[in-house]
């Protein structure tokens, strides 16, 4: 026999058979899972009396029709049919900003000792003598010579750019003589192969007539290398210098040979004639610490060049420092302290040169397609340490960073088409970046 009961959640009247007592049904209105209760005893339904003043046409609203549902056995019924209380929504609060602080492992940085300080002072005097010896052969170009010396004592390399006839090769040869270093010149041409630089294995016979492979060293095995017109050789040949520049070693036939220290590469390129050349890839240019530009000498300097080179004058350059002393200088340079505000200035300067950096200036986004990487910060700080010693100081200042900003950033900034179309060169962009990065922008100022 059928009987009716109400859904405890939505009050929908349901009709089931009394044989299905104890099973569960799904309410067709609210989908609530309900256990079929025991039917109540039949009682006569007595309608409530109508009030005396009620109109004769008034009638009770009809009750909603009951829905027939089908019971199904789905396991034990829920413990309660009462709807679960809905928790009140949490009060609206401002989301707390999560600050993630990077923690770096503490490392021990070696400080300068008394003997290091004395050696650094002697280095300043030795560099002054070196420049005096070079001046016997080279007229002017003081800034170029200083930047090359900085790159040598920083254990790095230099990319020299200038028109023909500015004594680029003569500067490097004179510097090698003044520093008592072995010197080799490699003329890069389109048909130059990597083995012509690094060397190769050749078959030779010993005194017993037995043949064996013997490694024949190439011109890379010298302490100072001049890669003349490096952009005239294809990238495969240019890449032959990468291992020697970074690891100071050469690998041929699976055998690695160390180069003699100190090792320095000075590459030259002609900015005027670009036909038939292979521009250096950006990753390879980044290996050079400085991109030094040589300009024409002044009128008085050129007059002195004419007087010296058209006479019987032959400069005799004396050695001032040895290779062992240069290696010792390269180690001491890294112990020079850098104030915190100088480090912050370096970070501000390099980050302002990146168009994708947050807070970049509008002119940076318009004129720079690609900015410098972390190696620019390293070279600025390391070059600043060397320059401080050459100036007779044992600490780096912001002036050291400003003085080296152009040669460090010049080959690490890629201008946009807009900049090239408007005739804006990289040096002009660096000038604007320096102007927009005041020395007081650092967070910690001494």
Image: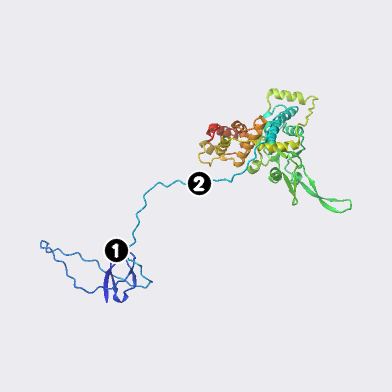
For label 2, the SS is loop
What is the x, y in percent for residue 185? 76, 38
Q: Is residue 211 visible?
A: yes
Query: Which tag, 2 or 1, sits closer to the chain's start?
Result: 1
- Judge by depth and name the residue closer to the eye, 418 or 294: 294
Residue lying at the far left in this picture: please name it. Answer: 52
What is the x, y in percent for residue 435? 55, 31
Please give the residue where the numbered disc 2 appears in the rendered image.
100
Please give the residue where the numbered disc 1 appears in the rendered image.
10
User: Viewed as shown, does residue 440 lie left or right of 97?
Assistant: right
Q: Nearer the viewer, mark 2 or mark 1?
A: 2
Mark 2: few, some, or many residues within 10 Å (few <14, many ≥20)?
Answer: few
Quadrant in which the C terminus appears: top right
Eyeballing the image, is 429 above or below 18?
above
Residue 403 falls in image quadrant: top right
User: Viewed as shown, does residue 401 lie left or right of 65?
Assistant: right
Quadrant in which the N terminus appears: bottom left
- Judge by depth and name the residue closer to the eye, 82 or 163: 82
Q: Residue at x 48, y 45 (%)?
A: 99
């Amino acid at each position: 026999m059928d009987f009716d009961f109400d859904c405890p959640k939505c009050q929908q009247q349901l009709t089931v058979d009394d044989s299905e007592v104890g099973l569960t049904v799904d309410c067709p209105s609210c989908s609530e899972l309900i256990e079929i209760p025991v039917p109540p005893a039949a009682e006569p339904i007595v309608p409530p009396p109508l009030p005396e003043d009620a109109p004769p046409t008034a009638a009770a609203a009809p009750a909603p029709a009951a829905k027939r549902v089908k019971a199904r056995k789905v396991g034990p019924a829920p413990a309660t049919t009462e709807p679960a209380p809905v928790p009140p929504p949490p009060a609206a609060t401002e989301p707390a900003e999560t600050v993630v602080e990077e923690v770096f492992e503490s490392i021990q940085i070696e400080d300068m000792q008394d003997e290091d300080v004395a050696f650094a002072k002697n280095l300043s005097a030795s560099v002054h003598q070196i420049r005096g010896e070079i001046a016997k052969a080279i007229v002017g170009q003081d800034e170029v010579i200083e930047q090359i010396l900085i790159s040598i004592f920083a254990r790095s390399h230099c990319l020299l750019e200038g028109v023909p006839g500015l004594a680029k090769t003569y500067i490097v040869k004179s510097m090698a003589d003044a520093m008592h270093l072995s010197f080799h010149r490699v003329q890069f041409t389109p048909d130059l192969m990597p083995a012509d630089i690094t060397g190769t294995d050749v078959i030779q016979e010993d005194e017993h007539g037995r043949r064996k492979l013997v490694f024949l060293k190439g011109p890379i095995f010298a302490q100072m290398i001049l890669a003349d017109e490096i952009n005239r050789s294809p990238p495969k040949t240019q890449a032959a210098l990468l291992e020697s520049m970074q690891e100071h070693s050469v690998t041929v036939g699976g055998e690695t040979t160390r180069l003699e220290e100190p090792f320095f590469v000075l590459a030259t390129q002609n900015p005027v004639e670009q036909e038939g050349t292979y521009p250096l890839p950006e990753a390879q240019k980044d290996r050079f610490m400085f991109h030094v530009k040589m300009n024409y000498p002044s009128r008085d300097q050129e007059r002195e060049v004419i007087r010296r080179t058209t006479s019987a004058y032959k400069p005799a350059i004396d050695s001032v420092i040895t290779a062992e002393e240069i290696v010792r200088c390269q180690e001491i340079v890294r112990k020079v302290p850098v104030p915190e505000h100088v480090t912050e200035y370096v970070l501000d300067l390099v980050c302002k040169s990146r168009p994708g950096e947050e807070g970049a200036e509008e002119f940076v986004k318009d004129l720079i397609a690609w900015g410098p990487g972390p190696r620019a910060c390293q070279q600025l700080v390391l070059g600043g340490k060397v320059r401080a010693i050459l100036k007779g100081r044992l600490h780096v200042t912001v002036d050291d960073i400003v003085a080296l900003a152009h040669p460090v950033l010049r080959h690490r900034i890629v201008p946009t088409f807009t900049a090239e179309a408007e005739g804006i060169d990289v040096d002009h962009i660096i000038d604007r970046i320096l102007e927009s990065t005041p020395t007081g922008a650092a967070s910690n100022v001494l």
